[in-house]
Amino acid sequence: MESSKIRLRFLKFFEDRGHKIIPSSSLVPENDPSVLFTTAGMQQFKEYYTHPKDAEKDFGSLNITTVQKCIRTGDIDEVGDSSHLTFFEMLGNFSFGGYGRKEAIIYTYDFITKEMDLEISYVTFFKGLGSIKKDEESKKVWQSLGVIDIREEGMDDVFWGPTGDSGPCGPTTEIYCKNADGEDVEIWNIVFNEYFCDGSREKLDKGEVKLTKLPVLGIDTGMGFERLVSIVQKKKSVYETDLFNNEKTKEERIIVDHIKAALFIISDGILPSNTGRGYVLRRLIRRAVRFSKESLENIINENVKKYKYVYILDDKDEIKKEENKFRETLERGMKEFKKNIDPFILATTYGFPIELTLELAKEKKIKIDLEDFDKKMIKHQKLSQTSSTGMFKGGLANHNEKTICLHTAHHLLLAGLQAIVDKNIKQKGSNITEERLRMDFLCDHKLTDEEKKKVEGFVNNKIKTKLDVIHREIPLKEAEKIGAEMEFGTKYPEIVSVYFIEDKDGNQISKEFCGGPHVKNTSELGGTNEAPKHFKILKEEAVSAGIRRIKAVLL
Protein backbone atom coordinates (compact mmCIF):
# COMPACT_ATOMS: atom_id res chain seq x y z
CA MET A 1 0.00 0.00 0.00
CA GLU A 2 1.38 3.42 -0.96
CA SER A 3 2.20 5.83 1.84
CA SER A 4 -0.22 8.43 0.46
CA LYS A 5 -3.07 5.91 0.75
CA ILE A 6 -2.09 5.00 4.31
CA ARG A 7 -2.17 8.66 5.33
CA LEU A 8 -5.58 9.20 3.75
CA ARG A 9 -7.02 5.96 5.12
CA PHE A 10 -6.00 6.94 8.63
CA LEU A 11 -7.79 10.29 8.41
CA LYS A 12 -10.83 8.78 6.69
CA PHE A 13 -11.04 6.01 9.29
CA PHE A 14 -11.37 8.49 12.13
CA GLU A 15 -13.49 10.95 10.19
CA ASP A 16 -15.99 8.14 9.63
CA ARG A 17 -16.04 7.66 13.39
CA GLY A 18 -16.96 11.24 14.25
CA HIS A 19 -13.55 12.90 14.35
CA LYS A 20 -12.88 16.36 12.89
CA ILE A 21 -9.81 16.45 10.65
CA ILE A 22 -7.52 19.30 11.75
CA PRO A 23 -4.51 20.31 9.63
CA SER A 24 -0.98 19.96 10.93
CA SER A 25 0.16 22.94 12.94
CA SER A 26 3.41 24.72 12.15
CA LEU A 27 6.75 23.20 13.11
CA VAL A 28 7.15 26.38 15.17
CA PRO A 29 5.08 25.75 18.32
CA GLU A 30 2.78 28.61 19.27
CA ASN A 31 2.03 27.73 22.87
CA ASP A 32 5.01 25.79 24.19
CA PRO A 33 8.10 27.90 24.91
CA SER A 34 9.87 24.85 26.38
CA VAL A 35 10.72 23.50 22.92
CA LEU A 36 12.05 25.01 19.68
CA PHE A 37 10.02 22.77 17.38
CA THR A 38 6.76 20.84 17.36
CA THR A 39 7.70 17.35 18.50
CA ALA A 40 4.32 15.61 18.82
CA GLY A 41 0.78 15.74 17.54
CA MET A 42 -0.73 16.72 20.87
CA GLN A 43 1.20 19.98 21.26
CA GLN A 44 -1.36 22.13 19.47
CA PHE A 45 -4.14 20.57 21.59
CA LYS A 46 -2.48 20.67 25.01
CA GLU A 47 -4.82 23.31 26.45
CA TYR A 48 -7.94 21.31 25.62
CA TYR A 49 -7.14 18.58 28.15
CA THR A 50 -7.65 21.11 30.94
CA HIS A 51 -10.34 23.13 29.10
CA PRO A 52 -12.23 20.45 27.11
CA LYS A 53 -15.26 22.63 26.38
CA ASP A 54 -13.08 24.93 24.29
CA ALA A 55 -12.55 22.09 21.77
CA GLU A 56 -16.24 22.07 20.90
CA LYS A 57 -16.16 25.84 20.53
CA ASP A 58 -12.97 25.96 18.46
CA PHE A 59 -13.39 22.83 16.31
CA GLY A 60 -17.06 21.97 16.50
CA SER A 61 -16.13 18.57 17.94
CA LEU A 62 -14.64 16.93 21.02
CA ASN A 63 -12.91 14.37 18.81
CA ILE A 64 -9.98 15.34 16.56
CA THR A 65 -7.63 13.58 14.15
CA THR A 66 -4.43 14.91 12.56
CA VAL A 67 -1.28 14.10 10.67
CA GLN A 68 1.28 16.37 12.36
CA LYS A 69 4.66 17.51 11.05
CA CYS A 70 7.34 16.97 13.71
CA ILE A 71 11.03 17.71 14.21
CA ARG A 72 13.17 15.96 16.80
CA THR A 73 16.92 16.50 17.02
CA GLY A 74 17.67 14.66 20.26
CA ASP A 75 18.78 11.56 18.33
CA ILE A 76 20.55 13.40 15.51
CA ASP A 77 23.66 11.25 15.91
CA GLU A 78 21.55 8.11 15.39
CA VAL A 79 20.16 9.29 12.04
CA GLY A 80 21.36 6.95 9.34
CA ASP A 81 20.24 3.68 10.93
CA SER A 82 17.05 1.92 9.87
CA SER A 83 14.54 4.00 11.85
CA HIS A 84 15.78 7.32 13.31
CA LEU A 85 14.62 10.48 11.53
CA THR A 86 14.84 14.22 12.19
CA PHE A 87 11.61 15.08 10.34
CA PHE A 88 8.65 12.72 10.62
CA GLU A 89 4.87 12.76 10.60
CA MET A 90 2.80 11.75 13.60
CA LEU A 91 -0.63 10.20 13.08
CA GLY A 92 -2.97 10.89 15.97
CA ASN A 93 -6.52 10.85 17.24
CA PHE A 94 -7.53 12.94 20.24
CA SER A 95 -10.60 13.26 22.39
CA PHE A 96 -11.45 15.78 25.07
CA GLY A 97 -14.30 13.96 26.76
CA GLY A 98 -15.87 12.49 23.63
CA TYR A 99 -14.98 8.89 24.45
CA GLY A 100 -12.89 6.79 26.82
CA ARG A 101 -10.48 3.88 27.03
CA LYS A 102 -12.72 1.28 25.44
CA GLU A 103 -13.44 3.25 22.28
CA ALA A 104 -9.82 4.42 21.91
CA ILE A 105 -8.48 0.88 22.12
CA ILE A 106 -11.13 -0.54 19.79
CA TYR A 107 -10.39 2.16 17.20
CA THR A 108 -6.70 1.31 17.40
CA TYR A 109 -7.33 -2.42 17.14
CA ASP A 110 -9.67 -2.04 14.16
CA PHE A 111 -7.33 0.28 12.24
CA ILE A 112 -4.27 -1.94 12.72
CA THR A 113 -5.89 -5.32 12.12
CA LYS A 114 -8.66 -4.46 9.64
CA GLU A 115 -7.53 -1.34 7.77
CA MET A 116 -3.80 -2.14 7.67
CA ASP A 117 -4.17 -5.95 7.85
CA LEU A 118 -1.43 -6.22 10.47
CA GLU A 119 -1.18 -8.63 13.38
CA ILE A 120 -0.65 -7.22 16.86
CA SER A 121 2.35 -8.85 18.50
CA TYR A 122 1.68 -7.65 22.04
CA VAL A 123 0.36 -4.70 24.04
CA THR A 124 1.24 -3.10 27.35
CA PHE A 125 -0.71 -1.47 30.16
CA PHE A 126 0.13 0.41 33.36
CA LYS A 127 0.63 -1.77 36.44
CA GLY A 128 -0.07 1.04 38.89
CA LEU A 129 2.06 2.78 41.49
CA GLY A 130 1.05 4.14 44.88
CA SER A 131 -2.13 6.21 44.56
CA ILE A 132 -2.19 5.74 40.76
CA LYS A 133 -4.32 2.68 40.19
CA LYS A 134 -3.53 -0.25 37.93
CA ASP A 135 -5.14 0.17 34.49
CA GLU A 136 -7.40 -2.87 34.69
CA GLU A 137 -9.90 -1.41 32.23
CA SER A 138 -7.39 -1.29 29.36
CA LYS A 139 -6.30 -4.84 30.10
CA LYS A 140 -9.90 -6.08 29.99
CA VAL A 141 -10.63 -4.29 26.70
CA TRP A 142 -7.57 -5.88 25.05
CA GLN A 143 -8.62 -9.28 26.40
CA SER A 144 -12.13 -8.84 24.97
CA LEU A 145 -10.57 -8.21 21.54
CA GLY A 146 -8.69 -11.51 21.66
CA VAL A 147 -5.18 -10.11 22.24
CA ILE A 148 -3.23 -12.81 24.10
CA ASP A 149 0.09 -11.19 24.98
CA ILE A 150 -0.75 -8.33 27.39
CA ARG A 151 2.17 -7.09 29.50
CA GLU A 152 2.33 -4.98 32.65
CA GLU A 153 4.79 -2.07 32.62
CA GLY A 154 5.71 0.70 35.07
CA MET A 155 6.10 4.48 35.24
CA ASP A 156 9.21 4.60 33.06
CA ASP A 157 7.52 2.91 30.10
CA VAL A 158 3.78 3.47 30.21
CA PHE A 159 3.08 6.70 32.09
CA TRP A 160 3.30 9.80 29.92
CA GLY A 161 3.91 13.42 30.84
CA PRO A 162 3.73 16.07 31.86
CA THR A 163 5.62 18.20 29.34
CA GLY A 164 7.22 21.36 30.66
CA ASP A 165 6.79 22.56 34.23
CA SER A 166 3.26 21.16 34.65
CA GLY A 167 0.37 19.76 32.65
CA PRO A 168 -1.86 16.80 31.87
CA CYS A 169 -0.48 13.28 32.22
CA GLY A 170 -1.58 9.70 32.62
CA PRO A 171 -1.04 6.00 31.96
CA THR A 172 -0.60 4.66 28.44
CA THR A 173 -1.07 1.47 26.51
CA GLU A 174 1.43 0.61 23.76
CA ILE A 175 0.86 -1.49 20.66
CA TYR A 176 3.64 -3.58 19.11
CA CYS A 177 3.82 -5.25 15.69
CA LYS A 178 6.61 -7.21 14.01
CA ASN A 179 8.78 -5.55 11.38
CA ALA A 180 10.28 -7.18 8.27
CA ASP A 181 13.07 -8.67 10.42
CA GLY A 182 10.55 -10.26 12.77
CA GLU A 183 11.39 -7.86 15.59
CA ASP A 184 8.72 -6.37 17.85
CA VAL A 185 8.37 -2.63 17.20
CA GLU A 186 6.14 -0.15 19.04
CA ILE A 187 3.95 1.53 16.43
CA TRP A 188 1.20 3.21 18.46
CA ASN A 189 0.82 4.68 21.92
CA ILE A 190 -2.47 5.67 23.54
CA VAL A 191 -2.20 8.14 26.43
CA PHE A 192 -5.05 8.44 28.90
CA ASN A 193 -4.72 11.98 30.25
CA GLU A 194 -6.64 11.68 33.51
CA TYR A 195 -4.41 13.69 35.87
CA PHE A 196 -3.04 17.21 36.11
CA CYS A 197 0.48 17.35 37.51
CA ASP A 198 1.54 20.59 39.22
CA GLY A 199 5.24 19.94 38.61
CA SER A 200 7.69 18.61 36.03
CA ARG A 201 8.22 14.99 35.03
CA GLU A 202 11.47 15.02 36.98
CA LYS A 203 9.61 16.08 40.13
CA LEU A 204 6.88 13.51 39.43
CA ASP A 205 9.48 10.73 39.34
CA LYS A 206 10.82 11.97 42.69
CA GLY A 207 7.34 12.08 44.23
CA GLU A 208 7.50 15.85 44.75
CA VAL A 209 4.23 16.77 42.99
CA LYS A 210 0.51 16.68 43.43
CA LEU A 211 -1.62 14.76 40.94
CA THR A 212 -5.19 16.03 40.60
CA LYS A 213 -7.81 13.98 38.79
CA LEU A 214 -9.03 15.84 35.70
CA PRO A 215 -12.81 16.23 35.41
CA VAL A 216 -12.74 14.74 31.91
CA LEU A 217 -10.62 11.88 30.59
CA GLY A 218 -8.52 12.99 27.63
CA ILE A 219 -7.34 10.68 24.85
CA ASP A 220 -4.00 11.40 23.13
CA THR A 221 -2.60 8.91 20.64
CA GLY A 222 0.51 8.97 18.49
CA MET A 223 1.78 6.69 15.74
CA GLY A 224 4.95 7.34 13.75
CA PHE A 225 3.84 7.48 10.11
CA GLU A 226 7.16 6.43 8.58
CA ARG A 227 7.45 3.47 10.96
CA LEU A 228 3.92 2.35 10.15
CA VAL A 229 4.62 2.61 6.41
CA SER A 230 7.76 0.48 6.74
CA ILE A 231 5.81 -2.27 8.51
CA VAL A 232 2.84 -2.16 6.11
CA GLN A 233 5.18 -2.21 3.10
CA LYS A 234 7.26 -4.97 4.75
CA LYS A 235 10.52 -3.03 4.55
CA LYS A 236 13.47 -3.42 6.89
CA SER A 237 14.18 0.31 6.90
CA VAL A 238 12.11 3.48 6.58
CA TYR A 239 14.51 4.47 3.79
CA GLU A 240 13.27 1.52 1.72
CA THR A 241 9.71 2.84 1.71
CA ASP A 242 8.21 5.09 -0.95
CA LEU A 243 8.80 8.07 1.35
CA PHE A 244 12.50 7.82 0.48
CA ASN A 245 14.62 6.52 -2.41
CA ASN A 246 16.18 3.39 -0.91
CA GLU A 247 19.25 5.16 0.45
CA LYS A 248 21.75 2.51 1.55
CA THR A 249 24.69 4.13 3.32
CA LYS A 250 24.58 6.11 6.54
CA GLU A 251 25.91 9.17 4.68
CA GLU A 252 23.17 9.00 2.02
CA ARG A 253 20.53 8.70 4.72
CA ILE A 254 21.88 11.64 6.73
CA ILE A 255 21.83 13.84 3.60
CA VAL A 256 18.25 13.05 2.57
CA ASP A 257 16.93 13.16 6.16
CA HIS A 258 18.54 16.50 6.99
CA ILE A 259 17.58 18.20 3.74
CA LYS A 260 13.98 17.02 4.05
CA ALA A 261 13.89 18.44 7.59
CA ALA A 262 15.50 21.71 6.44
CA LEU A 263 12.99 22.06 3.59
CA PHE A 264 10.04 21.68 5.97
CA ILE A 265 11.54 24.06 8.55
CA ILE A 266 12.20 26.81 5.98
CA SER A 267 8.71 26.32 4.52
CA ASP A 268 7.36 27.16 7.99
CA GLY A 269 9.18 30.49 8.00
CA ILE A 270 12.53 29.79 9.69
CA LEU A 271 15.79 30.89 8.04
CA PRO A 272 19.37 29.80 8.81
CA SER A 273 20.96 31.88 11.57
CA ASN A 274 23.23 31.58 14.59
CA THR A 275 20.47 31.45 17.20
CA GLY A 276 17.54 29.28 18.21
CA ARG A 277 15.65 27.46 15.47
CA GLY A 278 17.75 29.07 12.77
CA TYR A 279 20.86 27.60 14.34
CA VAL A 280 19.37 24.08 14.35
CA LEU A 281 18.40 24.57 10.70
CA ARG A 282 21.89 25.76 9.79
CA ARG A 283 23.44 22.76 11.51
CA LEU A 284 21.19 20.34 9.59
CA ILE A 285 22.09 21.89 6.23
CA ARG A 286 25.81 22.01 7.03
CA ARG A 287 25.83 18.40 8.21
CA ALA A 288 24.21 17.35 4.94
CA VAL A 289 26.73 19.39 2.94
CA ARG A 290 29.57 17.72 4.79
CA PHE A 291 28.49 14.26 3.56
CA SER A 292 27.37 15.33 0.09
CA LYS A 293 29.67 15.46 -2.91
CA GLU A 294 26.93 16.71 -5.25
CA SER A 295 24.46 19.57 -5.25
CA LEU A 296 21.52 19.16 -2.88
CA GLU A 297 19.08 20.53 -5.46
CA ASN A 298 17.85 17.13 -6.67
CA ILE A 299 16.96 16.05 -3.13
CA ILE A 300 15.03 19.28 -2.60
CA ASN A 301 13.08 18.86 -5.85
CA GLU A 302 12.32 15.20 -5.12
CA ASN A 303 10.81 16.07 -1.74
CA VAL A 304 8.76 18.95 -3.13
CA LYS A 305 7.34 16.52 -5.68
CA LYS A 306 6.83 13.70 -3.19
CA TYR A 307 4.79 15.83 -0.80
CA LYS A 308 3.09 18.19 -3.28
CA TYR A 309 -0.41 16.87 -2.58
CA VAL A 310 0.05 17.15 1.19
CA TYR A 311 2.24 20.16 2.00
CA ILE A 312 3.30 23.37 0.28
CA LEU A 313 7.11 23.27 0.34
CA ASP A 314 9.38 26.08 -0.83
CA ASP A 315 12.89 26.70 0.48
CA LYS A 316 13.22 29.94 -1.53
CA ASP A 317 16.77 28.87 -2.49
CA GLU A 318 17.89 29.25 1.13
CA ILE A 319 19.38 25.74 1.19
CA LYS A 320 21.39 26.46 -1.95
CA LYS A 321 22.65 29.74 -0.50
CA GLU A 322 23.70 28.04 2.73
CA GLU A 323 25.24 25.15 0.80
CA ASN A 324 27.37 27.39 -1.43
CA LYS A 325 28.51 29.47 1.51
CA PHE A 326 29.44 26.49 3.67
CA ARG A 327 31.25 24.45 1.00
CA GLU A 328 34.00 27.06 0.98
CA THR A 329 34.18 27.04 4.78
CA LEU A 330 34.19 23.25 4.79
CA GLU A 331 37.04 22.97 2.34
CA ARG A 332 39.24 25.43 4.26
CA GLY A 333 38.31 24.00 7.64
CA MET A 334 38.99 20.38 6.66
CA LYS A 335 42.52 21.32 5.61
CA GLU A 336 43.15 23.04 8.94
CA PHE A 337 41.53 20.23 10.95
CA LYS A 338 44.05 17.79 9.50
CA LYS A 339 46.81 20.04 10.88
CA ASN A 340 45.39 19.57 14.43
CA ILE A 341 44.54 23.28 14.73
CA ASP A 342 42.93 24.41 18.01
CA PRO A 343 39.10 23.95 17.69
CA PHE A 344 38.68 27.52 18.95
CA ILE A 345 40.78 28.84 16.06
CA LEU A 346 38.88 26.58 13.63
CA ALA A 347 35.59 28.13 14.83
CA THR A 348 36.56 31.79 15.10
CA THR A 349 39.06 32.12 12.27
CA TYR A 350 37.78 29.61 9.73
CA GLY A 351 34.07 29.51 10.68
CA PHE A 352 34.31 25.75 11.25
CA PRO A 353 31.46 24.69 13.63
CA ILE A 354 32.52 23.00 16.85
CA GLU A 355 29.84 20.33 16.27
CA LEU A 356 31.55 19.33 13.05
CA THR A 357 34.95 19.35 14.74
CA LEU A 358 33.59 17.05 17.48
CA GLU A 359 32.02 14.74 14.90
CA LEU A 360 35.25 14.48 12.90
CA ALA A 361 37.30 14.02 16.05
CA LYS A 362 35.04 11.17 17.15
CA GLU A 363 35.53 9.43 13.80
CA LYS A 364 39.32 9.87 14.07
CA LYS A 365 39.32 8.89 17.78
CA ILE A 366 40.79 12.29 18.69
CA LYS A 367 39.94 13.79 22.09
CA ILE A 368 38.76 17.41 22.10
CA ASP A 369 39.02 19.54 25.25
CA LEU A 370 35.52 20.96 25.08
CA GLU A 371 35.86 22.71 28.45
CA ASP A 372 38.84 24.69 27.15
CA PHE A 373 36.92 25.54 23.96
CA ASP A 374 33.92 26.79 25.95
CA LYS A 375 36.08 29.00 28.18
CA LYS A 376 37.72 30.61 25.17
CA MET A 377 34.41 31.14 23.38
CA ILE A 378 32.78 32.75 26.43
CA LYS A 379 35.67 35.12 26.72
CA HIS A 380 35.69 35.79 22.97
CA GLN A 381 31.97 36.25 22.55
CA LYS A 382 29.48 36.51 25.41
CA LEU A 383 26.63 36.12 22.94
CA SER A 384 27.49 32.44 22.58
CA GLN A 385 25.75 31.82 25.88
CA THR A 386 22.44 32.89 24.37
CA SER A 387 22.71 31.04 21.07
CA SER A 388 19.74 28.83 21.85
CA THR A 389 17.54 31.52 23.38
CA GLY A 390 18.22 34.57 21.23
CA MET A 391 14.58 35.18 20.41
CA PHE A 392 12.38 37.97 21.74
CA LYS A 393 8.92 37.16 23.03
CA GLY A 394 6.03 37.50 20.64
CA GLY A 395 8.05 36.65 17.54
CA LEU A 396 9.93 40.00 17.45
CA ALA A 397 13.38 39.90 15.90
CA ASN A 398 14.43 42.95 17.93
CA HIS A 399 13.03 45.95 19.76
CA ASN A 400 13.97 48.81 17.46
CA GLU A 401 11.53 51.52 16.37
CA LYS A 402 10.54 49.98 13.02
CA THR A 403 9.93 46.53 14.55
CA ILE A 404 7.81 48.03 17.34
CA CYS A 405 5.67 49.90 14.79
CA LEU A 406 5.08 46.69 12.86
CA HIS A 407 4.24 44.92 16.13
CA THR A 408 1.38 47.36 16.71
CA ALA A 409 0.36 47.02 13.04
CA HIS A 410 0.24 43.25 13.64
CA HIS A 411 -2.41 43.77 16.36
CA LEU A 412 -4.41 46.01 14.01
CA LEU A 413 -4.14 43.42 11.23
CA LEU A 414 -5.62 40.69 13.42
CA ALA A 415 -8.44 43.01 14.45
CA GLY A 416 -9.04 43.87 10.79
CA LEU A 417 -9.17 40.22 9.71
CA GLN A 418 -11.69 39.47 12.46
CA ALA A 419 -13.79 42.55 11.63
CA ILE A 420 -13.88 42.04 7.85
CA VAL A 421 -13.15 38.40 6.97
CA ASP A 422 -14.31 36.24 9.90
CA LYS A 423 -14.75 37.04 13.58
CA ASN A 424 -13.49 33.53 14.45
CA ILE A 425 -10.04 34.02 12.88
CA LYS A 426 -7.27 33.08 15.29
CA GLN A 427 -3.58 33.82 15.03
CA LYS A 428 -1.42 30.68 14.66
CA GLY A 429 2.04 32.23 14.40
CA SER A 430 3.94 35.45 13.94
CA ASN A 431 7.33 36.81 13.04
CA ILE A 432 8.15 40.51 13.02
CA THR A 433 11.34 42.15 11.80
CA GLU A 434 12.13 45.78 11.05
CA GLU A 435 11.37 45.13 7.35
CA ARG A 436 8.02 43.35 7.56
CA LEU A 437 5.49 41.50 9.66
CA ARG A 438 4.27 37.97 9.06
CA MET A 439 1.13 36.42 10.50
CA ASP A 440 -0.19 32.87 10.18
CA PHE A 441 -3.90 32.54 10.92
CA LEU A 442 -6.77 30.08 10.80
CA CYS A 443 -8.94 30.73 7.74
CA ASP A 444 -10.87 28.36 5.50
CA HIS A 445 -10.35 30.26 2.23
CA LYS A 446 -7.95 32.35 0.20
CA LEU A 447 -8.59 36.04 0.80
CA THR A 448 -10.13 37.79 -2.17
CA ASP A 449 -8.59 40.98 -3.54
CA GLU A 450 -11.55 42.88 -2.14
CA GLU A 451 -11.05 41.40 1.34
CA LYS A 452 -7.35 42.27 1.30
CA LYS A 453 -8.14 45.81 0.19
CA LYS A 454 -10.72 46.22 2.96
CA VAL A 455 -8.33 44.87 5.58
CA GLU A 456 -5.65 47.32 4.41
CA GLY A 457 -8.24 50.09 4.59
CA PHE A 458 -9.23 49.05 8.10
CA VAL A 459 -5.65 49.22 9.37
CA ASN A 460 -4.85 52.50 7.61
CA ASN A 461 -8.05 54.03 8.96
CA LYS A 462 -7.06 53.09 12.52
CA ILE A 463 -3.64 54.63 11.95
CA LYS A 464 -5.23 57.91 10.75
CA THR A 465 -7.74 57.89 13.60
CA LYS A 466 -4.85 58.25 16.05
CA LEU A 467 -5.92 55.59 18.51
CA ASP A 468 -4.26 55.22 21.89
CA VAL A 469 -2.26 52.05 22.60
CA ILE A 470 -2.63 51.38 26.31
CA HIS A 471 -0.88 48.81 28.45
CA ARG A 472 -2.81 47.52 31.45
CA GLU A 473 -2.04 44.83 34.00
CA ILE A 474 -5.30 43.20 35.04
CA PRO A 475 -6.46 39.97 36.72
CA LEU A 476 -6.39 36.93 34.44
CA LYS A 477 -10.08 36.20 35.00
CA GLU A 478 -11.03 39.73 33.98
CA ALA A 479 -8.89 39.52 30.84
CA GLU A 480 -10.58 36.25 29.87
CA LYS A 481 -13.99 37.73 30.65
CA ILE A 482 -13.52 40.68 28.29
CA GLY A 483 -12.33 38.36 25.50
CA ALA A 484 -8.71 39.47 25.19
CA GLU A 485 -6.86 37.52 22.48
CA MET A 486 -4.58 34.98 24.15
CA GLU A 487 -2.16 32.19 23.31
CA PHE A 488 -3.92 28.90 23.88
CA GLY A 489 -2.05 26.48 26.12
CA THR A 490 0.05 29.17 27.78
CA LYS A 491 0.02 29.16 31.56
CA TYR A 492 -0.63 32.76 32.66
CA PRO A 493 -0.11 34.30 36.11
CA GLU A 494 -2.98 35.76 38.13
CA ILE A 495 -2.11 39.26 36.88
CA VAL A 496 -1.54 39.53 33.13
CA SER A 497 -0.24 42.10 30.64
CA VAL A 498 -2.83 43.20 28.06
CA TYR A 499 -2.44 45.80 25.30
CA PHE A 500 -5.56 47.73 24.26
CA ILE A 501 -5.98 49.85 21.14
CA GLU A 502 -8.87 52.23 21.75
CA ASP A 503 -10.28 55.65 20.97
CA LYS A 504 -10.66 58.58 23.36
CA ASP A 505 -14.06 57.29 24.49
CA GLY A 506 -12.63 53.88 25.43
CA ASN A 507 -14.10 51.99 22.46
CA GLN A 508 -11.71 49.07 21.97
CA ILE A 509 -10.49 48.04 18.52
CA SER A 510 -8.03 45.44 19.77
CA LYS A 511 -7.17 43.76 23.06
CA GLU A 512 -4.46 41.11 23.31
CA PHE A 513 -2.41 39.33 25.94
CA CYS A 514 1.03 40.69 25.06
CA GLY A 515 4.35 41.57 26.64
CA GLY A 516 4.96 44.44 24.21
CA PRO A 517 6.61 46.69 23.32
CA HIS A 518 4.26 48.92 21.30
CA VAL A 519 3.92 52.51 20.17
CA LYS A 520 1.90 54.93 22.32
CA ASN A 521 -0.48 55.94 19.54
CA THR A 522 -1.32 54.40 16.17
CA SER A 523 -0.48 57.69 14.45
CA GLU A 524 3.19 56.79 14.93
CA LEU A 525 2.72 54.08 12.28
CA GLY A 526 1.86 56.71 9.69
CA GLY A 527 5.32 58.24 9.48
CA THR A 528 5.63 62.02 9.07
CA ASN A 529 4.02 64.65 6.83
CA GLU A 530 7.22 64.72 4.79
CA ALA A 531 7.47 60.89 4.63
CA PRO A 532 4.01 59.36 5.20
CA LYS A 533 3.63 55.60 5.55
CA HIS A 534 0.75 53.26 4.76
CA PHE A 535 -0.01 49.68 5.71
CA LYS A 536 0.30 47.34 2.70
CA ILE A 537 -0.29 43.59 2.36
CA LEU A 538 2.53 42.23 0.20
CA LYS A 539 1.44 38.61 0.04
CA GLU A 540 -1.33 36.31 1.20
CA GLU A 541 -0.77 32.58 0.77
CA ALA A 542 -1.53 29.12 2.12
CA VAL A 543 0.80 27.55 4.69
CA SER A 544 -1.17 24.32 4.98
CA ALA A 545 -4.81 23.28 4.84
CA GLY A 546 -6.85 25.77 6.86
CA ILE A 547 -3.92 28.06 7.67
CA ARG A 548 -3.11 31.22 5.68
CA ARG A 549 -0.15 33.58 5.88
CA ILE A 550 0.06 37.34 5.37
CA LYS A 551 3.23 39.35 4.90
CA ALA A 552 2.78 43.10 5.23
CA VAL A 553 4.79 46.30 5.55
CA LEU A 554 4.55 49.96 6.40
CA LEU A 555 5.76 51.99 3.42
Image (cartoon, grey):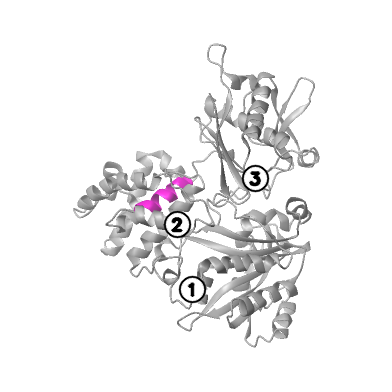
Question: Which of marks 3 and 1 precedes in the sequence?
Answer: 1
Query: Label 3 to label 2, Cα distance in Å?
Result: 24 Å
Q: Which mark is residue 445?
A: 3
Q: On screen, 412 above or below 389?
A: above
What's the amino acid at mark 3?
Answer: His
The stretch in magenta equals: 276-286
> Helix, strand or loop at disc 1?
helix
Q: On screen, 463 above or below 24?
A: above
Question: In the figure, is residue 261 to the left or right of 413?
Answer: left
Residue labelled with disc 1: 230
Residue visible at 44% across and 52% down in the picture:
263
Question: Which of marks 2 and 3 precedes in the sequence?
Answer: 2
Q: What is the crowding at mark 1: few (fewer than 14 residues within 10 Å), some, or many (at least 20)? A: many
Q: Quadrant of residue 322?
A: top left
Query: Label 1 to label 3, Cα distance in Å?
Result: 35 Å
Question: Which of marks 2 and 1 precedes in the sequence?
Answer: 1
